[in-house]
């Protein structure tokens, strides 16, 4: 399909008609609280919706405001994040809350450039926050939106780049109600993945996630889980409880310390206090 005027019109009509009949409902679609939407967007990075919903609801009950989140410990945030994976996002969210509280009076910025200066927020997450929190006509691409545009406009191409998709995103956006338009694009993309071979496989950004069992990610998660439950651990106790050999464990702990997760004092390891 080319991107002629009539094709764009038919594209919009198709997406809207599907959304009217099949729109999905999520807790973050039922709020206009920018902080709650920030939390949801960070959680939804690389994580399936079904796993996010209970964690999102628990997280905002534990930390109902940016001001409160900005004051809590690393240990508390990581504890609330357990089960979502990619724990670095929890540190990013804590850092973002602290910056917003300090520099923006506790109010999530409405400007994409300002949002991208926050820890862990790239162009697409910033665009999504602008759209869903403030109904601003920002442009962004995520996996389901990518699938929708590839299906309609790049059927006969492989290795489709996001920079090829962005002009179409900008050309088709509903500037009066971008929030609902993006929901519709995402819902259509989910349907495509259920009924067809995932169109996003044609994207240069597509990566098949490796097995979690036995992976480095699983071992890191196990170490953090133990340290969250106990105030501190000796290296020997940690190696024994995780069944990770000492050289590997020391290298992992060195990485975790550099990333701000833990601190080490002689032979003791604990979650960072800042």
Image: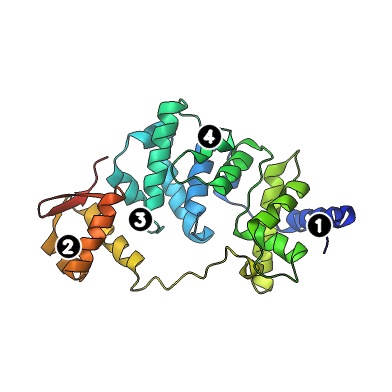
Which tag, 1 or 4, sits closer to the chain's start?
1
- Give the SS element for disc 3: loop
- Give the SS element for disc 1: helix
Q: Please state which of the two labelled residues, at mark 2 or mark 3, is closer to the viewer.
A: 2
Mark 2 and mark 3 in contact? Answer it, CB < 8 Å: no
User: Which residue is farthest top?
Assistant: 105
**Label 2: how many Cα within 10 Å (few below 14, some 14–19, many 20+):** many
Q: Residue at x 68, y 65 (%)?
A: 191
Q: Please state which of the two labelled residues, at mark 1 or mark 3, is closer to the viewer.
A: 1
Which tag, 1 or 2, sits closer to the chain's start?
1
Mark 1 and mark 4 in contact? Answer it, CB < 8 Å: no
Residue that numbered label 4 is attached to:
114
Place of residue 212 in the rendered image (x, y in percent of width and height, measured from the top left): 39, 70
- Give the numbered dot on residue 11: 1
How far is the residue under mark 4 from the one under mark 3?
A: 29 Å
Residue that numbered label 3 is attached to:
82
**Would residue 207 be visible to someone looking at this image?**
yes
Which tag, 4 or 2, sits closer to the chain's start?
4
**Label 4: how many Cα within 10 Å (few below 14, some 14–19, many 20+):** few
**215, above or below 98, in the image:** below
Q: Please state which of the two labelled residues, at mark 1 or mark 4, is closer to the viewer.
A: 4
Place of residue 8 in the rendered image (x, y in percent of width and height, measured from the top left): 83, 54
């Amino acid at each position: 399909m080319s991107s002629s005027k009539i094709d764009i019109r038919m594209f919009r009509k198709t997406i809207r008609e599907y959304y009217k009949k099949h729109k999905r409902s999520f807790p973050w679609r039922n709020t206009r609280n920018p902080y709650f939407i920030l939390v949801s967007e960070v959680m939804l990075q690389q994580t399936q919706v079904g796993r996010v919903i209970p964690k999102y609801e628990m997280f905002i009950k534990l930390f109902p405001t940016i001001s409160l989140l900005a004051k809590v410990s690393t240990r508390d945030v990581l504890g609330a994040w357990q089960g979502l994976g990619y724990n670095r996002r929890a540190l990013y969210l804590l850092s973002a809350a602290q910056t917003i509280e300090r520099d923006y009076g506790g109010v999530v910025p409405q400007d994409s450039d300002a949002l991208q200066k926050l820890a862990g927020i790239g162009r697409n997450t910033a665009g999504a926050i602008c759209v869903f929190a403030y109904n601003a006509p920002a442009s962004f691409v995520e996996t389901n939106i990518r699938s929708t545009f590839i299906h309609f406009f790049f059927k006969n191409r492989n290795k489709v780049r996001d920079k090829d998709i962005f002009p179409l995103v900008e050309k088709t956006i509903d500037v009066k109600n971008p929030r609902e338009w993006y929901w519709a694009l995402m819902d259509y993309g989910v349907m495509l993945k259920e009924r067809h071979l995932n169109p996003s496989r044609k994207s240069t950004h597509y990566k098949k996630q490796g097995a979690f069992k036995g992976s480095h990610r699983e071992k890191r998660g196990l170490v953090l889980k133990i340290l969250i439950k106990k105030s501190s651990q000796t290296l020997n106790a940690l190696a024994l409880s995780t069944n990770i050999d000492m050289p590997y464990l020391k290298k992992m702990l060195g990485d975790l310390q550099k990333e701000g997760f833990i601190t080490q004092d002689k032979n003791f390891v604990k979650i960072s206090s800042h």
